[in-house]
Image (cartoon, rainbow, N blue to C red):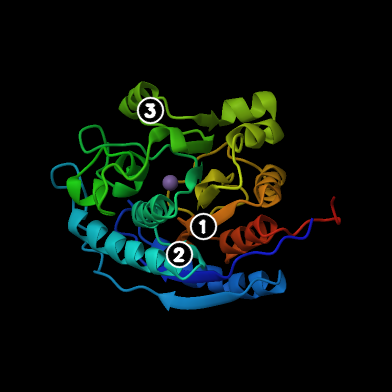
Amino acid sequence: MQQTYSPVSIFGVPTDVGAGRRGASMGPEGLRVAGLVEALRARGVDVDDLGDLKGPKNPWAGPRDGYRHLDEVVAWNRVVLEASSAELARGRMPIMLGGDHCLAIGSIAAVANHCRATSRKLRVLWLDAHTDFNTSQITPSGNVHGMPVACLCGIGPAALTGIGGVTPSMQVAQFRQIGIRSVDPDEKRLVKAHGLDIYDMRYIDEVGMRRVVEEALDGLDDDTHLHVSFDVDVLDPTIAPGTGTPVPGGINYREAQLVMEMIADSGRLGSLDIVEVNTALDQGNTTAELAVDLVESLFGKSTLMRD
Ligand SMILES: [Mn+2]
């Protein structure tokens, strides 16, 4: 099944203001050096690399009122929102190269607005070791990269929950989370109370990745925009060491390929985040190289010509 993809616009967001360790700011360049643009062009995709967005420096300060660097996080997310919105309006598929995962607030708020404006449904596939559903009251660290899903669902500071102009940007029921294996104690209660649809590692082990992805993609139709938020810490740290919050027991290479190929088969991919590539913690550039390999599959690369 040879698909044609809408033209793609790539932009880098070189910051780690939402993270607890420095270095995700180098992710965009790591992904470019690993050949992301060339790999997509080899798939026949029209790719425009817009370069990197600009924003405030990382002050590397402690938490205030439960948040670290909230002003800077808001500023970066505003530029992300603007860039994503502009590319969606031009009919191009935005691919955001993080940066840490707090930036998904802006990228997904943009997609949510676009879907509202064009009367399309939205499904977000959140590939991550973590549920990212913390709040200022329960966060152990104040790092906002642990809060984007909560913020998008209207739980968080007004500057983030309302960043796209509509609060909440998203409904919990629009999210599917795959690969989860690290949830903070109070966060567990919160995701349970809100009924987040979570495919954790135990469930993946029990039923297999094929069924997990079938369930996560169930109900997509021609009017559905699929956003994939790919935190590379979903991958097992033995194959993806270059990330700030590695957790053992992640998805392996074959499971990751299957997820990406099944998303490609759905034909619904509309936008993508690739976040938390931390080249300072990597072995060589292996994590970015693996991410590029997986993105090729996301854009339809497969071993055989399949019907
Ligand atoms: Mn994350």
Q: Residues within 10 Å of mark 2 (few under 14, many from 20)?
A: many
> Is residue 86 visible to the viewer in this orientation of the structure?
yes
**Residue highlighted by disc 2:** 88
Identify the amino acid type marked 3: Val
Q: Residues within 10 Å of mark 1 (few under 14, many from 20)?
A: many
Dot 3 lies on which element? helix
Instruction: Tell me: is circle 2 under 8 Å from ligand 1.
Output: no
Q: Secondary structure at mark 1?
A: strand
Q: Nearer the viewer, residue 136 or 167?
A: 167
- In the rendered structure, which disc, 1 or 2, sits on the residue that comes first in sequence? 2
Residue shown at the point (24%, 69%) measured from the top left: 56
Q: Earlier in the sequence, mark 2 or mark 3?
A: 2
Q: Which mark is residue 175?
A: none
| Marks 2 and 3, how far apart at CA | 30 Å
Counting from the top left corner in percent of width and height, residue 210 is at 71, 35
**CA–CA distance between discs 3 and 1?**
25 Å
Sooner in the amino-acid sequence: mark 3 or mark 1: 3
In 3D space, how far apart are the residues under numbered discs 1 and 2 (Cα atoms)? 9 Å
Mark 1–mark 2 CB contact (< 8 Å): yes
The structure residue drawn at horizontal position 61% and vertical position 47%, both measured from the top left corner, is 222
**Residue indicated by mark 1:** 271
3 and 1 marks in contact (CB < 8 Å): no
